[in-house]
Image (tube, helix red, strand yellow):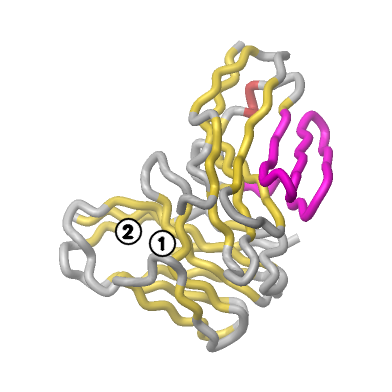
Amino acid sequence: GGIITQTPKFLIGQEGQKLTLKCQQNFNHDTMYWYRQDSGKGLRLIYYSITENDLQKGDLSEGYDASREKKSSFSLTVTSAQKNEMAVFLCASSRDRSNERLFFGHGTKLSVL
Amino acid sequence: GDQVEQSPSALSLHEGTSSALRCNFTTTTRSVQWFRQNSRGSLINLFYLASGTKENGRLKSAFDSKELYSTLHIRDAQLEDSGTYFCAAEVPNYNVLYFGSGTKLTVEP
């Protein structure tokens, strides 16, 4: 088995601030993903990466940057936090790019004051 | 997006009863996954199907790629089955999963 660790668990930011979320996995999976979940809604893909240093945009990439520094880690940056924004950011990984069985971290809950 | 229509949006069951959740797809779908999200926000992968049916304990899922739908049957519901269930469809050529909006299941004594 393996685990996906997201840090921090809770993130409080100010409007306009640049905020970085981190994700580590020890599954040795090739592909990693960042999803955003708004209250009462499904997940929307922000970015994904099929290997180290690779980056692919999802439907929601505007306003975000991402970085796959090494196979085990994938970070997401909110480039300019929006006032009153509140969402959960979920990191996931899968063995390869075929979207075979996604495994998720516990999420980072973002609140912007 | 609109690729996945999940129903019902909310469901309440008494312990010991059974029901089914459904996802309809508006486009060709290569595979489907089902997840349960608990109250703390953790998402657990329940099933991955490229076709046919799979069963795990009291849960059974089916995927019909021709008729563009998938179902998740919950038999003999227990309190710990409560949570929000999501289906996610893999759309060919897009290499991403499209999630439904979820079914919030509450199992009551």
Q: Is A111 on the left or on the right of A38, as rendered?
A: left
Q: Quadrant of residue A103?
A: bottom right
For residue B62, the mark is: none
Determine the chain carrying the residue at label 2: A
Task: Check if mark 1 and mark 2 are on a common chain.
Answer: yes
Could you tell me what secondary structure mostly forms the magenta stretch? strand
Amino acid type at image mark 1: Pro
Helix, strand or loop for disc 1: loop
Q: Is B74 on the left or on the right of A20, as rendered?
A: right
Identified at 62% across, 66% down, the residue is A93
Q: Quadrant of the N terminus of chain A?
A: bottom right
Please identify the residue farthest to the bottom as the structure is shown.
Answer: A53
Identified at 53% across, 33% down, the residue is B103
Identified at 64% across, 47% down, the residue is B44
Q: Quadrant of the C terminus of chain A?
A: bottom left
Between residue A61 and residue A52, name the one nearer to us.
A61
Q: Position of residue B18 (x, y in %)?
A: 71, 19
Determine the chain carrying the residue at label 1: A
Magenta residues span B44-73
* Magenta segment includes B62: yes
Amino acid type at image mark 2: Leu
Which residue is under mark 2?
Answer: A11
Mark 1 → mark 2, Cα distance in angstroms:
6 Å
Q: Position of residue A68 (x, y in %)?
A: 51, 82
Q: Is residue B75 above or below residue B94?
A: above
For residue A8, the mark is: 1
Determine contact: label 1, label 2, CB under 8 Å: yes
